Image (cartoon, rainbow, N blue to C red):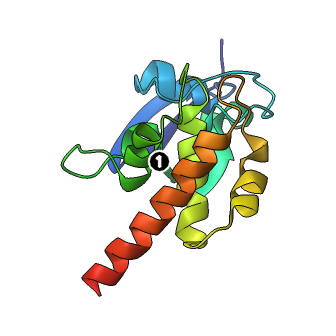
Amino acid sequence: MPDMRKISVTVNGRRHEAEVESRLLLADFLRNTLDLTGTHVGCEHGVCGACTIMIDDCSARSCLMFAVQAHGKSITTIEGLADADGSLSILQEAFRQNHSLQCGFCTPGMLITLTEHLRDNPDPTEDELREVLTGNLCRCTGYQAIVEAGLDAAAKMRASKAEHA
């Protein structure tokens, strides 16, 4: 009989309680239990970055964590990045405008990674964005459009902050 554990997590602002096997990966919990399929599973070794989410506002690889390790934590997935009204975030819109995705498999991890980075560094250089994205693999874009979207979003976020100050 599998070892079952009760967990309580807040995902994208909604609290969820579930009984899970102690060996269930967080990525599988998000995708299969909560039906949040935007978190992609690629390498299952934490290398590709497709499964990147935020836990308590810090990026993490959901394929390297068990769901029970997230008990009591706040999780943000790609589905939680949109604005409250459902419109795209500034960064998501910048990805759209800069044609920063092709197949889209890496996009959720890229967006989560850049969301955290731009929060902590609102005026990044191109080299800084390239460095922060080294943990997210993309086979389609060559990264240039993704970096351009990050720079575009950072500029728009700074302008929006100045406008509201």
- The residue that label 1 is drawn on is 76
Left or right position of 154 against 4: left
Q: How far across and down, in percent of the image, does residue 57 sit?
A: 54, 60
Residue 44 in sight in this render: yes
Quadrant of the drawing holding the N terminus: top right
Q: Residue furthest top?
A: 1
**Front in this rendered view, residue 32 or 23:** 32
**One can see residue 11 in this view:** no
Residue 129 % position (x, y): 69, 57
Residue that appears at 57% across and 59% down: 116
User: Hey, what amino acid is under mark 1?
Assistant: Thr
Near-viewer residue (110 or 30): 110
Which one is in front, 32 or 136? Answer: 136
Q: Give the answer, above or below, for where 26 lies relative to 28.
A: below
Residue 67, how many percent across, how many down?
60, 35
- The secondary structure type at the circle numbered 1 is strand
Instruction: Give the residue drawn at x 41%, y 45%.
Output: 92
Q: Residue furthest bottom?
A: 165
Q: Position of residue 33 (x, y in %)?
A: 45, 22
For residue 58, what is the image quadrant? bottom right
In this picture, residue 147 sits left or right of residue 33: right
Mark 1 nearby-residue class (10 Å; few <14, some 14–19, many ≥20) = many
Point 67% across, 34% down: residue: 66
For the point 28% across and 51% down, the residue is 83
